[in-house]
Every structure is written in C-alpha cells, then in structure tokens.
Image (spheres, grey):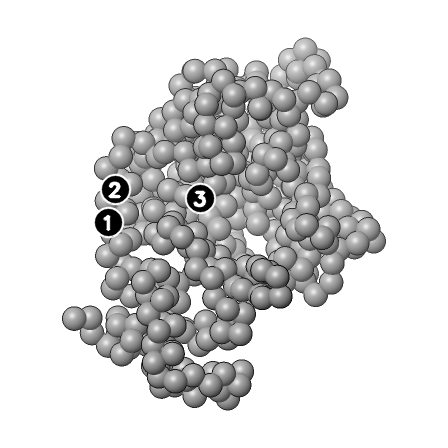
Amino acid sequence: MANESTSPISGRPKLRPLDMRWVQDGDAKWLMLRDPLGISPQPLLVPGGAAPLLALCDGTRDLATIRSSAELRAGLRLTPAQLAEFVSALDQALLLDNERFHQAHAKALRTYRSAPFRSPALAGTAYPAEPEQLAQTLVGYSKNLAPRQASSAEHGDDRRVMGVLSPHIDYARGGPVYAATWAHLQDELQQTELVVVLGTDHVGGPGELTLTRKSYATPLGRAPTDTQLVDALTDALGPDTVFANELHHRNEHSVELATVWLHHLLRGRAVALLPVLCGSMHHLVRNGGDPGDDQAFTSFLTLLAETMRQRRTLIVAAGDLAHVGPVFGDAAPYGRPARDRLASADRESLAAIGRVDPEGFFSTVRRDRDARRYCGLTPIYLMLRLLETAGASQGDLIAYDQCPADDEGGSFVSIAGMVFKGGAS
C-alpha cells in the first residue's frame, strides 16, 4: 500500500506539469488536461467549475485542507467522497506526481531505451508517414517561394553556413518558412560532418540540457546520434543531469521537425547528429540572472566549441519566437496594431540574433520580462554563443511570419528562419 506521501487519497496530491487548455462544448466549458510526456495516453476533461481544485493539488495540502480551501477561495462545496473521486480520476489518468506515475514513467523509459531508435512521434499526424508523400509535401512548400539567390561560392564569397534558426511550429502553418530557410543549406550539408540540433524542451525545467543516445528516425531516414560526443558531454555535465529527463525526447517535436528537413536534404547521406533538448531560461529573465554564469551552459558550450574546431559542424536552433494573444494568457486579442508592434519588437530581437550577439538578444527578451513568451529562447541563445566562439560573422533573415494560433484570429506565434555564415568554405 502506498504511504501518505504518495497516496492520492490519504496523502497530499500533487499535479504533474501538464498541457492545459480550455475547450467549449455547447454551453459547457471544460479544461482539457494533456500529458506532454505521453505517459497518460488520453486527455482528461475537467468541468470548468472544478478547475480551481487543480491549483490546490500542489503537494502541500491533504484532502481536508483542499476541501476547506476550495470553499474559501472558490465557493466550491464538496463532500469528502466527491473530492476523493476527483483526485482518484487524476490518479487513474497518471496525472499526479506519485508512485503510480513514477512506475509508469520507469516502464516507458525502459521501453524507449530498449528500442533500436527514437521513432518519429508525429509521422502520420503532423506530416505524412509515407516517404514519397512526405517528400512531395516538403517540396510543395517551396512552390511559391521566390527564386533562391546564388550560393556564396558562386558570388566569390568563401564563407560557409555555420548555423541556422529554424522554426518548430507545425508544417501546416510554418511550411513556407521552413522551406525557404532549409533551401540555403543544400550545399553546406554535402560537406557537414556533424549537425547539432538544439531544440526547445517544452516541459524542460530551468536551465536543463537533456541528451539521448537514441538515433532520430524519420520516414526519410535515420540520423545516427554521435554517442561518443554524448558520452563526453555526460562526463562533463554528469549523467544525473543530462539523462534525468531523457524520456522528453520521445514525444518532443522540436528536434524531430528539424530532422525531417535534414533527412530531406541529405537524400540518404549519413551525417552524425547531436540532439539536445533545452529547458527554460525564464528563471534568468525573472530574476535578472546572467546566462553566461550558468556552469552547465559553460561546460556544454566549451566542449562543443572544441568539437566545432575539429569537425565541420552545423548548429541548428529549432525554436519559435513569440506566443501572444488570449490562447497564451493575454487579456486582449492581437489586432493589426498589436501585431505591428509585435513585428517591430521581433525585428529588434532578430537584429541582435543577426549580429550574432547572444547577450544583446537575451536583453531584448529580458527587457519586457519575456512578455512575448519566446519559445526558442534557450536554443537561440546557446546557438549564438557557439557561433560567436566559432567566428560566425552574421545571420541573414530569410523569412518571418506570424502564424494564427486560434480560430478567432486573435492569437499568434511568430517564427523566423535565418542562416549564419563565417569561416571558410
């Protein structure tokens, strides 16, 4: 029998980090809870009136305290049996941080690690699972693009592409930006030895860097993860640090959506991959900290900088920009004037990114306490640090867009594609 600290009924229930969003069904309003790790396979719908209970399930209150707090704070009057039924539903759905969840997590991690590769999580949903159809879909995003300029070599410019900012939004909305950006990498990838993909970890904790030894597979191929480099980073950062949340790789889409384009352009050529999921830097935004003082970041960047001196490396930051509007917590929809102000603020951030100025970029986000909710903050910052050390001279903005995020047209995600050049080709 579970002890008091882990039992959802007799103990202090603690809700796990979840994806929560409101859904409307006629006159009824529900809060949909989804598990970003996929441990709980199905979403759970909570009646809107019961939503205040979720904030009280933070691991500090027993059921009696939750009942009294719910009545005092929200006017919710529940019998002990009703509250026990509510908490039991959360427990059965594996949405509580307790022994039942930890056992399910351990089983899922064993299954992930025993697989021959990391299977594509979005094939058949966000993009076609059949290789030929997928290739045609990716080519289709390029049909209405302006003709690409001649390569640097054709202009007598001997600088090579060293880095790229790529979105991680779905292809349905971001396809043209992906296509325009990755078109500039076709020549570079023929000579690249290592691709480092820094992806946003949407459920990652503050400052976390999460590795995996699994190779990323897509319908178009398999990118062999450089396990020797993973081992070197593990020695530098510690296994408890880099593998604590390895299961995040299983369902996180940021690295996967970049890797699909990588495979599309490689056309069967094998290039070593280092997939890295990057947690939040918002603790530094809020507290005024300096990311340059983060020891884990410093160790990570030092080792990768040395690797870049020895091998021809492409750095990919798979990160979106702003997330604004009611869907993301803003009080008012973003009409045209607000969208124009967003574009202006984004241009300032993109200008710093283009200068390969990591601290300047971070300051544009910190200045407004990340009111724009930059989803790619950590990957972009770390990419700029690496490119700065490696001597990249500039980043060219290839495309920018504001993608709708709701049916009402008041919420948006801004994205951009950039390529960074430096060194000699």
Give me the C-alpha separation between circle 3 and circle 1.
18 Å
Q: Whole-percent x and y of residue 196?
A: 45, 33
Answer whether labels 3 and 1 touch (C-beta < 8 Å): no
Q: Amino acid at mark 3?
A: Glu
Tell me the crowding category of disc 3: few under 14, some 14 to 19, or many 20 or more residues within 10 angstroms, Cα based.
many
Q: Whole-percent x and y of residue 318?
A: 54, 39
Q: Is residue 105 above or below residue 62?
A: above
Which residue bears the numbered disc 3? 252
Which residue bears the numbered disc 1? 107
Q: In the rendered image, is residue 300 in sight?
A: no
Tell me the crowding category of disc 1: few under 14, some 14 to 19, or many 20 or more residues within 10 angstroms, Cα based.
few
Answer whether labels 1 and 2 touch (C-beta < 8 Å): yes
* Foreground: disc 3 or disc 1: 1
SS category of the residue bearing label 2: helix
Q: Nearer the viewer, residue 329 or 361?
A: 329
Q: Amino acid at mark 1?
A: Lys
Image disc number at residue 177: none
Which residue bears the numbered disc 2? 111
Give me the C-alpha separation between circle 1 and circle 2.
6 Å
Q: What residue is rendered at 49% in x and 36% in y?
A: 125
Q: Amino acid at mark 2?
A: Thr
Q: Quadrant of the N terminus?
A: bottom left
